Image (spheres, helix red, strand yellow):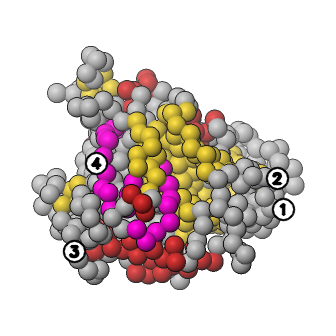
Amino acid sequence: MPTQRKPFTRRDFLAASGHVGLGVAGIGLLGAPAIVLAEGRRPTVEGGVMSGDVLPDRAMLWGRASMPSRMLVEVADNPEFRGARQLPWIDVLPGTDLTGKIDATGLQGMNTVHYRVRFAALGDSRAASEPVVGRLQLPPSQPRDIRFVWSGDVVGQGWGIDESRGGMRTWETMRQVRPDFFIHSGDTVYADGPLEAQTELPDGGVWRNIVTPAKQKVAETLDEYRGQHAYNHLDANFRRFAAEVPMLAQWDDHETTNNWYPQEILDNDLYTEKNVALLAARGRQAFLEYMPIRMSTSAPQRIYRRFSYGPGMEVFMLDMRSYRGPNSTNLQGEESSATAFLGENQFRWLRQALNDSTATWKVIAADMPIGMVVPDGDQFEAIANRDPGQPLGRELEIARLLQAIRDDDIANVVWFTADVHYTAAHHYAPERASFKAFKPFWEFVSGPLHAGTFGPSEMDATFGPQVTFFKAPPEGESNLPPSAGYQFFGQADLDAESETLTVRLKDSDGRTLHTQVLEPEPRSANA
């Protein structure tokens, strides 16, 4: 049996995460009084800072406090914070697990935004935390080179943070390529995957996890779901990355429980709560609290959204989890609520958004792949159904989307995804497909960031995928630990002058495994 560590206490968490990031200790907010009160009455910044959902003139800024307090944020166009502007404050309370998000507006004209976050005790502004500093790149309005990275799947299959092995190293590797933004392709946590303190490895070594109370069982309560997200912030690599690279986050299944769908009632002895809709509501709340996502007041639970990165690129973030029908044999001959995957509202939104976009490249960030078979026992979890013929089941909705892209003459659509825990490049073409009413397109797969590695997946021929490249564990091996070298991310580079999009699949050491250079189709006359 693995040796159990002593429980990870709140004091341990504060010691690990209270003064991290790119902080400059002792720099106060404009006009802030000196820190003179006892340490116990002064809040700290827990788990670093984050930014996300960046627009040309605004960005979401995130922080978490150690106690109920006032979140104070400054922004500037220089790292010395000369002429810094203080944003309107917000109070953070236990109702959001002491997390705070501020929509920093009025940033137009800045290229790089520098920001710093402090928390002050409620009722005594003299009791303020030391600042934690971050920075972000704003999207351009004029042509310029753009770089982004993407991946997914964090702390899965029992592989948590082992500090003796450098923690979650892929985050640091991604940070070092200095991307403009990061697409988090789902499975941001594994709320259904408890951690053991130690796991023996096949080579005779031992993997030693940091284990917190929330990570010792499957998440069911809101606080347990929150603890899943707080765990990732214990890793120094993650904190450094999040302080420098804006995040565009989407969710998938493991933010709630494996392979879930909204109508499901669990048959699992690990759960006392069997109502998946209730579990998903708690999981969604924790996800939204811990991710720097801007929510619409008209649709406060909607996770799908879009982001422009100048004339060269627009990103469309999908939600393939919230509106799906039940997992099934996936062989229905007609569309219905049982075959829904995006759902009709999201489908109409995406089609209209693609038509409205004037960007050269339309990047579709999908939390699940199209042609890869992802089983759920005898049923199917994703789109493909292992039947190589005409579209059936969930393939019907995707076929309708692909045909709409062709009929609307939408050029330069490329898909980026994760979920399957290995990396691959797929080209889809009608001449190889059973269903032929679509334009050829690429799908790039990456991940995991820090989880067990599997694959490769079986491919479904309905949409004619051709596997151009893949890297997965050797045949017969699965759930390899992060130390085995099968952790992956992808990097995409847009050249402003030529508008070529170069996609590289990389490993956790930053080695390029595969490169694909995509030339854009010419802009149509009415673009």
Question: Which residue is label 4 attached to?
Answer: 458
> Do the residues under discs 2 and 1 have CB atoms within 8 angstroms?
yes
Question: Which residue is label 2 attached to?
Answer: 77
Residue at the top extreme? 204
Question: Which residue is label 1 attached to?
Answer: 109
> Do the residues under discs 1 and 3 have CB atoms within 8 angstroms?
no
Q: Nearer the N terminus, badge 4 or badge 2? A: 2
Q: Residue at x 25, y 21 (%)?
A: 202
For the residues marked 2 and 3, what is the alpha-carbon distance in whole angstroms?
55 Å
Q: Residues within 10 Å of mark 2 (few under 14, many from 20)?
A: some
Tell me which segment is drawn in magenta: 436-465
Which mark is in front, 1 or 3? 3
Q: Residue at x 40, y 76 (%)?
A: 400
**What amino acid is found at the position of numbered circle 4 in the picture?**
Glu
For the residues marked 1 and 3, what is the alpha-carbon distance in whole angstroms?
52 Å
**What amino acid is found at the position of numbered circle 1 in the picture?**
Gly
Q: Residue at x 52, y 77 (%)?
A: 407
Question: Which residue is label 3 attached to?
Answer: 332
For the residues marked 4 and 2, what is the alpha-carbon distance in whole angstroms?
49 Å
Q: Nearer the viewer, residue 501 or 117?
A: 501
Instruction: Please tell me in which quadrant of the rendered image residue 333 appears.
Output: bottom left
Q: Is residue 492 visible?
A: yes
Q: How many numbered marks appear?
A: 4
Marking on residue 508: none
Q: Nearer the N terminus, badge 4 or badge 3? A: 3
